[in-house]
Amino acid sequence: MQKNTFISVVLSIAIVGGALYFVTKTPEASLGNTEVAQTQNTEMRDGVQYVTLAAKGGYFPKLSSIKPDIPTKLIVKTSGTYDCSASLVVRSIGFQKVLAPTQEEIIDLGTPKPGEKIQGVCSMGMYNFQIKAE
Amino acid sequence: MKNTKLQGENEKSSSDVIWQAIPIGLAFLALFFIVQKSGILNLGLGGPATPATSFIVGLVASVSSCLAVVGGLVLSLSAQVAEDDKDNRKPFYLFHMGRLGGFAFLGGLLGALGGAIGVSFTLGAVLGIVASLVMIILGLNLVGVLNKRAVKLPAGIFDYFKKVEHQVFAPLIIGVGTFFLPCGFTQSMQVAALSSGSFVSGFLIMLSFALGTLPVLLVLSFGSVTFAQSKHAPLFFKSVGVVVIGLGSFALLAGLVGLGLIDPLFNI
């Protein structure tokens, strides 16, 4: 029995460790979502700063940085998105909406102060993103 | 004397079973999270929602992270029912009928009423947290932690479950209630039904979605009965317990993040 316990504990640790290694790899490295992550995702147009995120199986890029003290809008692009990332909640500005499967949602973030963090999650909470003003 | 020896052997074999169940359960959990992470499930489905696309979305949803909530709940309830009375299949039929009927009818209502009713995020998140707590409690019970330690509080809950298992109403209601459980796919389909503009189209969209999720849920519920009647029943129940505790904890943490009560801990 002690041998079984030992084998069981070793196996369990191996499984959990392996899964953690796989799951905690950076989301950018996972399949198919590389395009947005590696390019600059903010741009200035008519004095407004736009941050663009792709929403499908999570939000990409997961971390964005913007310049503070500029009126800022967030563009969330869905493309054939039916998963949780389509139902977006940005609590700090009171935004919650289920996005259409393919659309671009423009969300006004106001004028973020230096050091402000804007956190978005999907309604079930398993996907999230953060935008930092710095 | 013979009795105590027998009892000793039983205890020994039951503690052996748990040591087998933990790696089996963890392996299933690991597989689940790896599949989520791999991005296999992020199929591109363009165009407007038709009953056919809703069905496919349902198929995908039934193996997606929604499985953590809806599937976990079905699995834990089924295993609990099967453990108490392995020949009692009535609750399963009622649950699936309630789910299909509820999705179809509520989808029809969404289509007919249009924007008049919104599906509340907060309600969904609260129900999701309740469902995950039920899963964790049932999981602990299946593993056998609660039985041995004689935890006082859940005793009443289990008596209640035993009564409920033989009723008609409760499984039906739980089936209908899964409409409101948090699941991104369900919400997308609800919005599609909402904007479909008529009772019939909303009805068809949600019914096809629920039909798409049916195969996996049928396997979970009737699979539990099949295993409950086999000689591997103790190992099965304990492994399910481990899986359900894992999924329940995941759903609970995610639900708290969704409500903004805690910071995100993970991003699968």
Image (cartoon, coloured by chain):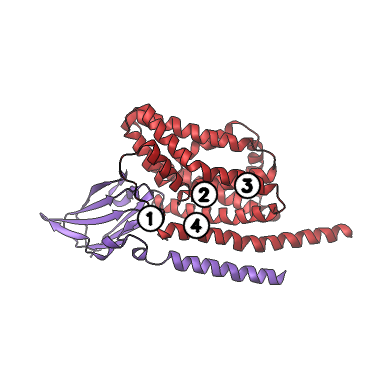
How many C-alpha atoms fall within 10 Å of the one at disc 3: few (<14), some, or many (≥20)? many
Given contact means CB atoms under 8 Å apart, are the residues at marks 3 and 2 in contact? no
Residue B224 shows which numbered tag?
Answer: 3
Mark pair 1, 2: CA separation: 18 Å
Provide the secondary structure element on which disc 1 rests.
loop
Residue A127 shows which numbered tag?
Answer: 1
Q: What amino acid does circle 4 point to?
A: Phe
Do the residues marked 1 and 4 share a common chain?
no
Do the residues marked 3 and 1 share a common chain?
no
Q: Which residue is mark 2?
A: B132
Would you place residue B54 above or below residue B249 in this image?
Answer: above
Q: Return the disc, 2 or 4, that comes first in the chain's sequence.
A: 4
Mark pair 3, 2: CA separation: 19 Å
Tell me, what hue is chain A?
purple
What is the quadrant of the C terminus of chain B in the image? Answer: bottom left
Residue A6 shows which numbered tag?
Answer: none
Mark pair 1, 4: CA separation: 16 Å
